[in-house]
Image (cartoon, rainbow, N blue to C red):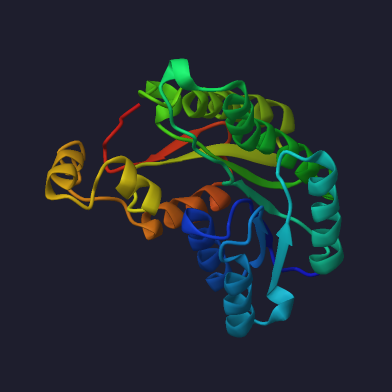
């Protein structure tokens, strides 16, 4: 069995997930890129392979809410690396709409992608972790505590993720530590569009909510993820990385 640590990041074809893959690969981890729709996963895999070798990366397509697909993915991870040490549950979707316009289908899809996905991937991590030791990081959102307009499904899912993290931490200790990473405003395409950050008015309005005076960068989030992985006496905690935008 390889002595290198191995991290699976769900929803890691693009955005924060891809940034986490790059950061952990640069730190010597074996990395697993999970995706539902390619959207860049193949290119990211080739990038990591070129930089660190084919043995350091595995890209695998799986719906995180599909038990059979997730179980097969973990089997493949163990075949490839011989182990799994860290799970970062980053996969999720947004389907914003006013409360009275959210459909049953949209509600089920959002809850499933976030809450069920974290649950299924978390369970299978335990089932495939021979030593019953490791780290799970669930990616949350401040909206899971504060709520917001036009996102009842997303906010409800992220609220569930926060409580799920505590339940997992209680039951999986002491061997597996489970914490919740909660990013703030990072300049992803989704955030830029939501808050109209491409406009001077939108950017000024958003920056006014940030005591640190700037938007977050992927490096801010990935740095905290590494800290959580190495925090040996911390479980069941929430880590806000938002420049003071939401303090709790």
Seen in the image, is 161 located left or right of residue 191?
A: right
Measured along the vertical axis of the image, is residue 136 above or below residue 16?
A: above
The residue depicted at 58 percent of the width and 82 percent of the height is 51
Seen in the image, is 244 located left or right of residue 19?
A: left
Number of numbered markers: 0
| Viewer-nearest residue: 98 or 26 | 98
Residue 145 on image: x %, y %: 42, 23
In the picture, which quadrant includes the C terminus? top left
In the picture, which quadrant includes the N terminus? bottom right
Residue 68 on image: x %, y %: 85, 43
The residue depicted at 58 percent of the width and 32 percent of the height is 110
The residue depicted at 71 percent of the width and 79 percent of the height is 54
Measured along the vertical axis of the image, is residue 55 above or below residue 101?
A: below
Locate residue 211: give its quadrant: top left
Seen in the image, is 64 located left or right of residue 25?
A: right
Residue 34 on image: x %, y %: 67, 56
The residue depicted at 53 percent of the width and 72 percent of the height is 26
Measured along the vertical axis of the image, is residue 154 above or below residue 2?
A: above
Locate residue 80: give its quadrant: bottom right
Locate residue 77: give its quadrant: bottom right
| Viewer-nearest residue: 162 or 107 | 107
Residue 241 on image: x %, y %: 37, 43
Residue that protrudes farthest toward the top in the picture: 100
Q: Can residue 185 be seen by looking at this rendering? A: no
Seen in the image, is 183 located left or right of residue 82?
A: left
């Amino acid at each position: 069995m390889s002595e290198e640590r191995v991290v699976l990041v769900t929803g890691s074809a693009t955005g924060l997930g891809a940034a986490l893959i790059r950061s952990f690969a640069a730190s010597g981890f074996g990395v697993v890129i999970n995706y539902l729709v390619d959207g860049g996963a193949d290119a990211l895999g080739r990038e990591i392979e070129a930089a660190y070798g084919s043995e350091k990366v595995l890209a695998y397509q799986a719906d995180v809410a599909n038990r059979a697909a997730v179980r097969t993915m973990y089997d493949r991870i163990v075949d490839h690396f011989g182990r799994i040490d860290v799970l970062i549950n980053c996969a999720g979707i947004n389907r914003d709409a006013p409360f009275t316009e959210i459909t049953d289908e949209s509600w089920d899809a959002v809850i499933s992608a976030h809450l069920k996905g974290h649950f299924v991937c978390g369970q299978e991590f335990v089932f495939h972790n021979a030593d019953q030791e490791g780290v799970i990081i669930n990616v949350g959102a401040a909206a899971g505590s504060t709520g917001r307009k036009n996102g009842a499904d997303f906010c409800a899912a992220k609220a569930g993720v926060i409580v799920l993290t505590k339940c997992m931490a209680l039951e999986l200790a002491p061997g597996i530590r489970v914490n919740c990473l909660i990013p703030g405003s990072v300049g992803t395409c989704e955030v830029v569009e939501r808050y109209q950050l491409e406009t001077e008015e939108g950017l000024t309005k958003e920056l006014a909510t940030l005591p640190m005076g700037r938007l977050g960068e992927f490096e801010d989030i990935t740095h905290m993820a590494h800290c959580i992985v190495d925090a040996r006496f911390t479980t069941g905690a929430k880590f806000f990385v938002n420049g003071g935008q939401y303090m709790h």
